[in-house]
Amino acid sequence: GWLSPYTNGVVYIAMELDPGVIQAFQMVDDGNLKPIGKPVSTEGRHPCYSKLDTSGKWLLSANYSSGTVSVMSVNEDGTLGQPVCKVQHEGPLIEELKDRQEGPHAHCIIPHPSNQYVVACDLGLSKVFVYEFDAVTGTLKGE
């Protein structure tokens, strides 16, 4: 899985499962992690990367096997809300890579420092997607 730290002692662990889930954990005094809230679906398969937006109110997820990216809300206590946005990556495969890539494989998603854009890399399509990000609603627009 993938571990995304958060400043208030909460970390988010993406479980590379099918269907994919992300669980919030609180770091306790002895250094162990205690689950908080319930695991939340990424609405994709095998999430391999997650990252908080710059406000800390949204968690972005890249789902490798389904070739999707999703956004879920982060509650004030650090627990996760349900996904509010999911985007399926689409596009032509590069002919020279068809022997290794059969479809989209989102593998990274990062917010721009302005929090107005999100960039997602897709290994299967050999493409970088740039989305407009609405930090009020958590939605992605564009490519």
Image (spheres, grey):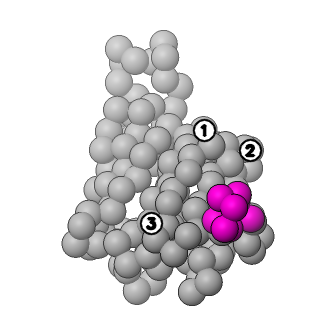
Percent position of residue 49, x then y:
51, 48
> What kind of residue is marked 1?
Ser
Which secondary structure dominates the residues rendered in magenta?
Answer: loop
Q: What quarter of the picture does the C terminus occupy?
A: bottom left
Disc number lying in front (3 or 1): 3
Residue at point 72% right, 44% down?
A: 17
| Cα gap from disc 3 to disc 1, whole angstroms | 21 Å
Chain part drawn in magenta: 27-34
Badge 3 or badge 1: first in the primary sequence:
3
Disc number lying in front (2 or 3): 3
| Cα gap from disc 1 to disc 2, whole angstroms | 9 Å
The residue pinned by badge 2 equals: 18
| Cα gap from disc 2 to disc 3, whole angstroms | 22 Å
Residue at point 22% right, 72% down?
A: 114
Q: Kindly tell me whether residue 44 is visible in this rendering.
A: no
The residue nearer to you, when weighing 37 against 61, is 37
> What kind of residue is marked 2?
Asp
Q: Pointers 1 and 2 in contact (CB under 8 A)?
A: yes
The residue pinned by badge 3 equals: 52
Q: Is residue 127 above or below residue 73?
A: above
Per the image, label 2 sits on a secondary structure element best described as loop
Q: Kindly tell me whether residue 110 is visible in this rendering.
A: yes
The residue pinned by badge 1 equals: 65
Q: Pointers 2 and 3 in contact (CB under 8 A)?
A: no
How many residues crowd mark 2 within 10 Å: few (<14), some (14–19), many (20+)? some
